[in-house]
Amino acid sequence: MGTAGTADTAGPTAGTIEQARLNRCEAEDEAGAEPWRVWGPYLSERAWGTVREDYSPGGTAWDYVPHDHARSRAYRWSEDGLAGICDQEQHICFALAFWNGRDPILKERAFGLTGGEGNHGEDVKDYWWYLDSTPTHSWMRWRYHYPQAEFPYSDLVNTNRARGADDPEYELVDTGVFDEDRYWRITADYAKAGPRDFYIRVQAENKGPDEATLHLLPHLWFRNNWSWGTVGREAVPTLTGDVGRLTGEHCTLGRIVLDGSGEPEPLVCDNETNKRRLWGDDGPRYPKDGINDHVVAGADTVNPERRGTKGALHYVLTVPAGGTAEIALRLRSVDPAAAPDGPAEALSLFEQTMALREAEADEYFRALTPAACTADEANVLRQAVAGLMWSKQFYHYNVSRWLEGDPAQPEPPRERRYGRNTHWWTLSARDVIVMPDPWEYPWFAAWDLAFHCVALSAVDPALAKKQLLLLLQDWYLHPSGQIPAYEWSFSDDNPPVQAWAALQIFHADGDRDYLFLKRVFHKLLMNFTWWVNRVDANSDNVFEGGFLGLDNIGPFDRDAGVPAGDQLEQSDGTAWMAMYSLNLMDIALLLAEHDAVYREMVMKFFEHFGLIAAAANKMGLWDQEDGFFYDVLRTPSGARIPMKVRSVVGLLPLVATSCVRADAMAAVPELRKRVQWFFVNQFDQANLLMGCVDMNQTHRLLTMVTVEQRPRVLNRMLDEGEFLSEHGLRALSRAHKDQPFRLNINGTDYSVDYEPGESRTTMFGGNSNWRGPVWFPVNYLLIDALDTHQAFFGDGVTISYPSRTGVQTTYGAVADDLADRLVGVFLNDASGRRPVFGDVKLFQENPAWHDQIPFHEYFHGDTGAGLGASHQTGWTALAINLLLRKRRRAAGPDER
């Protein structure tokens, strides 16, 4: 079985204080006690424009609660803010807000374009970074660059809307607001003194050439649970203000206190919708945007009695050019019976606690970082961990309640009962989940989360297991066995990578948690059955599945745009199912070593893999002339038209690969009998399957790709003129730059060109492109497949790498080099440039910007520049695992 990215985190970090604290967290979880993770960075960067908040007839989420409504409208299901933290059920929220004296609104949340406004889909237009976080959030650091000039909201919308698909996105840096360094560099540090006790330091550095004034407003508020008429949620919490202090009283949390240094003015309003501003109706006297209107316009919209459900401490900081202002805060749970203290007393241990937690974080990351890593690589590793930790978000969505509406609110339009997620009335989520991206994708996605868990296993394997199991629980998993895909359409099909991820996590945690494997296996049996019944229309073991997460990789929308009457048999859908079968077989083999009951499951999934591998060759997915796997369009007349697009779709059969110990298979005598029966009674398929099984004295290599096919596929994959770039493997062969794919079906023209950067098609919104860029998840899977081949062949078998060079290299060395190419997008090259920044001079040359790393959704296939979502440290956090390979490399080939 493959080993890409596995790491025994109990080893290098075992002696650190943070690892001991993390171990206690797990013990406390098991005992039902309150762990240190009970408060954390679980507040999303965006709640507006989400499906959960959308009660429109047509499912127009971006329009129903736009950014312009966000400051004025109480959210139903979640909250958002900058540098935000909250408790794990999001009753109490804390975030920062700023005002430069020029903006029309407070900067309470990041701004971005909706899908219809951007020329390449939705896109955030602020610059912030997650610079640090330990796994328990005992120490965290966040940074934001805030212009001193008026934030160009209208310019960003109007200019992007006017640009075409061939033009680049118009970004905040392009507007000129950072010219002459006229911005605030704001850093927020968080240090925990206990599970419900955060010390917070906020530093505002004036990078500009002149003295400037910044309004800094740390916000504390309660999520609105009381306005919807839900039984048991009627109690309204209270927040009161005093000089330097906000105090909250909550029926569940008790007393919460925010103290601030100095003498900031407390401002208090209510977390209630401003109905007058939005709809001209009567509403609360001091609504949600009351603090905004008071600070920006001097309006009488904060409660003079300093009482409500939302508050802020208002600091006005005038700072000379090059100077820095600093405030100290403490957010904590307080025993109401304890003797009261003042803000100064509450902050008496501030410096000591901040220094201690930062030192502990330094110790932890020194231990985690392989000795072979450079300082630059260590910086990338630490920020990748930070981004992954900050991506944990509270996710609340009760679909049946959402469809029916709330007792105290108007009944939703009837159209909603026939629209999005109608069939998922059993789904009821209220959990902290590692999200793909806290702004662009502030909701879980099934296959994304599996990769997040693989990255998470490198630092917190216990949490990785819980996260992977989460979507398999009854309140997520559909009664049919389907795993919900993502909130825009739970019914879409995401690639079934959960079994693969479970194996990765199992190995990362020391090959010991068989109970975890059992729990995953039993749930995935239901899901596997759903796949077999749902996406194998002809019951021939060749699978469909729609776009399967690869968005616009084909000539038409594979989820909905297949020509009328035709059926698309998918190379990737079939490969995913072959991989799924092998993964479940591998799990069953591991469990069978301890429990004979699982032997039958080994047989089941071996046979299912054999049928799929044979069918892929028998039914024409393999093109002998081209030496590649393609999707095949089957017409009503029975004709088969290969979709000859050389894309990652044709590489994915390589990931359906497993290296199994011969003695482990021999320990299942029933398997030997079943294999003999298979070869006697399924002779035509057995002949095809024989090419998919390699044997040596100690191992068996099972793979969807036959012995004859493997070198031909690898030759294309590792060709610098096709898939291999300086920055990893492209999603589409570069050969299509000069040879675009063209097809006419029933008078309609379809095409696929090589597009290494932003997508030029609006398919799937235009903000996702699989026609040339480099994506970390599929690269990681292919690296894992190469590792599996290395485990079988060892150093005795080599391949030409890059293709056509004649240089012979082992499979493992190819995997290592691909890992280096991927991580290299973040690292300084010989000229001191980071490919991820592209040609943006400010990022490449200015020291205040250059060492803060954005982890993008995908990367330009030729230059390595970051594209798509700019904070997707979910699956791009696989950089952690790729960097940790250096430890195994240093240990020698036996540790690979």
Image (cartoon, rainbow, N blue to C red):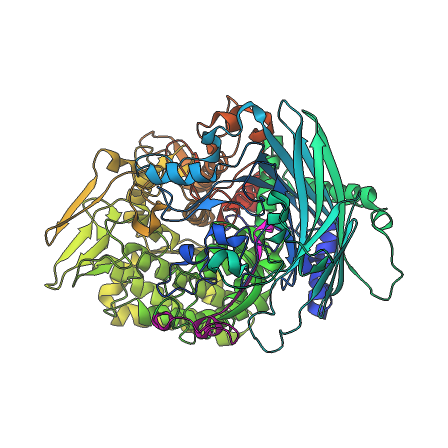
Side (left or right) of 433 relative to 33: left
Give the residues drawn in magenta, as a range.
389-418
* Residue extending farthest right: 339
Q: Is residue 438 above or below residue 209?
A: below
The quarter of the picture where residue 619 lies is bottom left
> 102 or 743: which is nearer to us?
102
Visible in this render: residue 7? no
Q: Whole-percent x and y of residue 481? A: 42, 72
The quarter of the picture where residue 701 lies is bottom left
Q: Whole-percent x and y of residue 95? A: 64, 50
Q: Is residue 371 above or below residue 253?
A: above
Is residue 212 on the magenta stretch? Answer: no
Side (left or right) of 437 relative to 362: left
The structure residue drawn at horizontal position 79% and vertical position 50%, both measured from the top left corner, is: 243
The structure residue drawn at horizontal position 55% and vertical position 61%, both measured from the top left corner, is: 273
The structure residue drawn at horizontal position 58% and vertical position 37%, both measured from the top left corner, is: 380
Q: Is residue 336 above or below residue 4?
A: below
> 724 or 869: which is nearer to us?
869
Q: Is residue 544 above or below residue 361?
A: below
Q: Whole-percent x and y of residue 16? A: 74, 47
* Residue extending farthest bottom: 231
Side (left or right) of 406 relative to 216: left
Q: Whole-percent x and y of residue 239? A: 72, 60
